[in-house]
Image: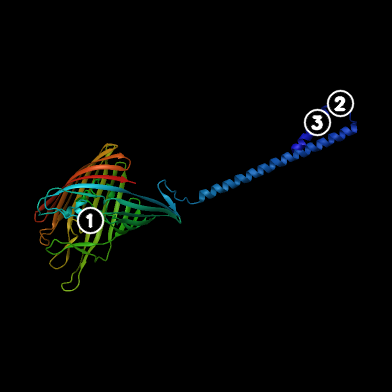
Amino acid sequence: MIRSSLMTGAAIALMALPGAALAQDPATLEARIAQLEAQLTALRSEVVASRVEQAARQQSLTGDVLRIEQRVAAAPAAPAAPADGFRIGNNTLKFGGFVKADVMASRYNGGDPANGDLLRDFYLPGSIPVGGADESAATDFNARQTRLWLTTDALLGGRRVTSRVEMDFQVLPGTGDQRTTSPSNLALRRAFITVDNWLIGQEWSNFQNITVLPETADYIGSSEGTVFARQVQVRYTRGPFSISVENPETTVTPHLGSARIIADDSSLPDLTARYVVSRPWGEVSIAGIVRQLSYETTGTGAIDSSTPGWGVSAAGKFKVGARDDLRVMVTAGEGIGRYVGLNFANDAVLDASGDLQPIALIAGFASYRHVWSPAWRSNLTWSAQSVDNDLSLIGVTTNRSARSVRGNLIWTPLPALDLGAEVMFGERELESGATGDLTRLQIFAKYGF
């Protein structure tokens, strides 16, 4: 095309020269003009063909791009790996946890717990010594609340599948020898998988609302007033409603005694249901549980007894002003002792005939959280439980009630780093009227990752 254009231009220039035109005869000049016209026609044809070819290529390319975009839009989106996670096959894995170190100075007016007793690590209302001699304060250091977790997240066949494994070092036995290395055993906390709305594995009981638990230096804090249980279950959640079947276990008080028998004779799982309402002002929940309490023995004086148990728990977290909040929980029922207050009361007691009688209780807590500034906050928490024992069936050393109050100040000088101090007072009362109390100062450092 370029060569033809040059030839045509040269010919036209040649024709424009008078001398050149006069030097040729008419026949030669006409032949030359005809030749130039033919070349010009061929050039025009090449230009038109080139434009048609270019338009066809552009149309084809546009169609290819459109088809690719349609395929991408129709393909299912795979979960993107977050900045703090990594991919293995179809799964996005995340690893995290926290390191926590505690220093506790505790004084018990009813006797000093033995070295290695879990009461020296966190508040167990049912273990406060009663009836012993008053001793001076005991100081303990530990890092057993340190926690590790691993999660996976995948989209498989159009369904979301996740899993979580979580562990810490708060296990009994396993306190180790504090003279040398102070070892602690790693123990399972949570281990479950979810497929869309279904959860299968070990998780917090559906009867419990963990989002309203107070922020405390202690592991649990409002122990006696809190529903607290982790166990294997199958749970279905749809929006604000969840229902589950969970591992059954019955704790029994012997007739006219105060000890604890742990029975595993239930044939039916515990059934729980919970409904949560979330609004800009906070959230509230109502949960219920129905159970089969069972105890069976063989041989002389064999016992084979079962009775129903039930419970209701209401919980809420309410915003106060721009940054503060109030957290409350109230739980009541019969035969739910192992779910409340770290099994402060048993589920049932045996009567003279060997039949189980459910034990009634009521428990609750209230906690106010005040934010002084972005780096400083405090929590004031009150908690209590009262057990309605049948005095004709139990011993006088059975737990009647427990209560505690605590306040803390927590500082966050760096992201994920908390430094805090907490003062608490707890009291345990028996059916005999005897009491024991615990006063504790706890200082901690916690770093999450």
Circle 1 crowding by C-alpha within 10 Å: few under 14, some 14–19, many from 20: few
Tell me the amino acid under the disc marked 1.
Asp
Q: Is residue 167 left or right of residue 358?
A: right
How packed mark 2 is, by other alpha carbons closer than 10 Å (few <14, some 14-19, many 20 or more), is: few
Q: Pinpoint residue 272: horizontal percent, then vertical percent.
A: 28, 57
Residue that label 1 marks: 177
Q: Tell me the CA gap for discs 2 and 3.
A: 14 Å
Q: Is residue 380 visible?
A: no
Residue 19: mark: 2
Tag 3: amino acid: Ile
Helix, strand or loop at mark 3: helix
Q: Nearer the viewer, residue 29 or 238?
A: 29
Tell me which label, 2 or 3, sits earlier in the chain.
Answer: 3
Q: Quadrant of residue 32?
A: top right
Q: CA distance from mark 3 to mark 1?
A: 109 Å
Q: Position of residue 88 (x, y in %)?
A: 44, 54
Q: Nearer the viewer, mark 2 or mark 3?
A: 2
Spot occupied by residue 49 in the image (x, y as percentages of width and height)? 72, 42
Q: Nearer the observer, disc 2 or disc 1? A: 1
Say which quarter of the image contains residue 418: top left
Q: How is the image coloured?
A: rainbow
